[in-house]
Image (cartoon, rainbow, N blue to C red):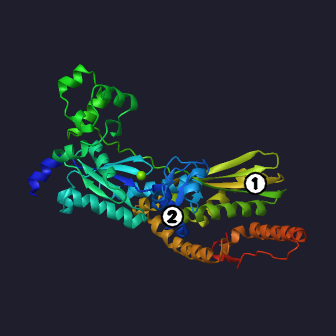
């Protein structure tokens, strides 16, 4: 096909990516034991929100109750939704697509649109190849497959991505649109509301193609309003619906809290409890490969009064030592000597996907990343031998306490069970001594 012809096919080249079984796929990526198995999310609602292809193959579908699913798919693994993780993967998807073009619309947690018009010169390949290149990159980097669609506008790109699932790619040039619209029920067009499709059906318009073939005069006579006129124009190949490229950078937050009994007024002890939360929150952030630009901590007193402060960073981090240092600076503004405290909490906020932090504007980043390599080793050991194997000296007191309490509980519990089986976690208890301040 000559370049001129394909230019005419795509005066604007809009792509749509749609994550396949997105939530269930994220669960399978995070937990390798779930791979290849029928996984269903939405356990906390009692109805399926997402199903792995293994589950779909057995006939389960979205909206089914867990009881119905168990009947047709007894091996189904039902998990509770983990929206923090899903939105982290969504952010990563947007960031990957944005590395090809800045014009990306974050349409939903598992879908985005991108305008790739004009990129053929840069990549020296067709729009179809560019779309597939991005699709492959998404799969390679996230481990999740995406269905991709290419069209002259958002509406046709969305129809295209739905055409072949999972992991499919479909291109709909304007001049071939009729092939895809002839069997598409009017109610299945993106943006077509229920009452409008009923109205159109009453007028004898049953398919997207029948709608596209109407003329201006027909639209005016039948008082078709602007949003549906826009859809009509897009079905005919025009570019009308603009991409909303605003970004919402917030993923949410990661919070760790710890209540302790009896309450304590010991500064070192309370600080150590807080340190443990800082380590926990940062470890979770690193597991998800995200960093936080701000954080906050609180102390809860015996009479349930909260006191806390926020911390802002110049660069996003997931390094507990840095947060520990900053918390220690502010700690005494919150901690009141002589007061009994019963809980501490630490929250990482303004979380960004790691990809976002590659720009080297600040010399700080490199320094922070060198430090993080040590953390990778720590994470590796904890993964291998159990959480808390290697921890920071700052949380040592809190951990020691916890362990003694666990032993105490085990001692008390033993006579009741009548067995001396003690499930002891392999704990090497290696304090990481590099950070004591
Ligand atoms: Mg999807």
Few, some or many residues within 10 Å of mark 1 (<14, 14–19, 20+): many
* Residue nearer the viewer, 231 or 125: 231
Residue occupying image coordinates x 89% and y 68%: 416
On whether ligand 1 comes within 8 Å of the CB at mark 2, the answer is no
- Image location (x, y in percent) of residue 123: 21, 62
Question: Quick one: label 2 or label 1, which is nearer the N terminus?
Answer: 2
- In the rendered image of this protein, does residue 44 appear above or below residue 209? below
Identify the mark at residue 28; answer none if there is no mark. Answer: 2
Image quadrant where residue 239 sits: top left
Q: Does the Cβ of the disc 1 residue fall within 8 Å of ligand 1? A: no
Residue sticking out furthest to the right: 415
Q: Quadrant of the C terminus?
A: bottom right
Whether residue 136 can be seen here = yes
Left or right: residue 113 versus residue 51 is left
**Of the residues tagged 2 and 1, which is closer to the observer?**
2
Task: Write down the quadrant of residue 355 in the picture.
Answer: bottom left
Question: Between 258 and 34, which is closer to the camera in this rendering?
Answer: 34
Q: For the residue labelled by badge 2, is the local secondary structure a helix, a strand or a loop? A: helix
Which class describes the residues within 10 Å of circle 2: few (<14), some (14-19), or many (20+)? many
Residue beneath the point at 70% across and 60% down: 274
Quadrant where the N terminus is found in the figure: bottom left
- Residue 3's spot in the image, x, y percent? 10, 56
Q: Please name the residue shown 77% across and 63% down the image.
A: 268
- Residue 94 pos. (x, y %): 39, 54
Give the residue number, with chain letter if any, for mark 1. 343
Q: Is disc 1 placed on a helix, strand or loop?
A: strand
- Badges 2 and 1: C-beta atoms under 8 Å apart? no
Q: In the image, is residue 157 above or below residue 40?
A: above
Foreground: 125 or 371?
125
Is residue 315 visible in the rendered image? The answer is: no
Task: Tell me residue 5's x, y (percent).
Answer: 10, 52
């Amino acid at each position: 096909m000559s370049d001129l012809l394909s230019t005419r096919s795509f005066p604007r080249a809009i792509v749509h990516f749609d994550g396949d079984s997105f939530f269930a796929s994220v669960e399978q990526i995070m937990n390798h034991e779930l791979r290849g198995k029928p996984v269903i999310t939405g356990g906390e609602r009692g109805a399926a929100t997402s199903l792995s292809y293994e589950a779909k193959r057995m006939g389960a579908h979205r909206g089914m109750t867990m009881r119905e699913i168990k009947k047709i798919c007894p091996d189904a693994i039902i998990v509770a939704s983990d929206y923090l993780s899903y939105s982290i993967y969504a952010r990563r998807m947007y960031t990957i697509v944005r590395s090809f073009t800045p014009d990306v619309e974050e349409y939903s947690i598992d879908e985005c649109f991108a305008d790739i018009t004009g990129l053929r010169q840069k990549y020296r390949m067709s729009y179809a190849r560019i779309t597939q290149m991005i699709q492959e990159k998404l799969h390679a980097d996230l481990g999740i497959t995406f269905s991709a669609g290419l069209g002259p506008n958002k509406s046709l790109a969305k129809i295209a991505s739905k055409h072949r699932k999972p992991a499919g790619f479909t291109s709909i040039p304007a001049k071939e649109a009729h092939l895809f619209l002839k069997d598409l029920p009017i109610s299945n067009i993106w943006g077509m509301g229920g009452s409008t499709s009923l109205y159109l059906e009453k007028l004898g318009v049953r398919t997207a193609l029948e709608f596209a073939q109407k003329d201006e005069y027909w639209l005016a006579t039948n008082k078709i309003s602007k949003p549906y006129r826009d859809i009509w124009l897009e079905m005919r190949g025009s570019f009308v619906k603009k991409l909303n490229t605003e970004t919402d950078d917030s993923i949410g937050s990661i919070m760790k809290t710890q209540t302790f009994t009896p309450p304590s007024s010991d500064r070192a002890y309370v600080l150590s409890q807080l340190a443990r939360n800082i380590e926990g929150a940062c470890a979770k952030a690193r597991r998800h490969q995200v960093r936080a630009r701000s954080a906050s901590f609180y102390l809860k007193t015996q009479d349930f009064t909260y006191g806390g402060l926020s911390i802002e960073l110049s660069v996003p981090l997931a390094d507990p030592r840095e947060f520990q240092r900053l918390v220690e600076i502010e700690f005494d503004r919150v901690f009141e000597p002589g007061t009994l405290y019963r809980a501490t909490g630490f929250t990482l906020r303004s979380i960004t996907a790691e990809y976002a932090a590659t720009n080297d504007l600040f010399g700080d980043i490199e320094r922070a990343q060198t430090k993080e390599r040590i953390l990778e080793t720590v994470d590796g050991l904890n993964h291998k031998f159990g959480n808390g194997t290697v921890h920071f000296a700052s949380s040592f007191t809190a951990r020691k306490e916890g362990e003694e309490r666990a032993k105490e509980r085990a001692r008390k519990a033993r006579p009741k069970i009548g067995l001396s089986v003690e499930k002891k976690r392999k704990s090497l208890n290696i304090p990481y001594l590099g950070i004591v301040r």
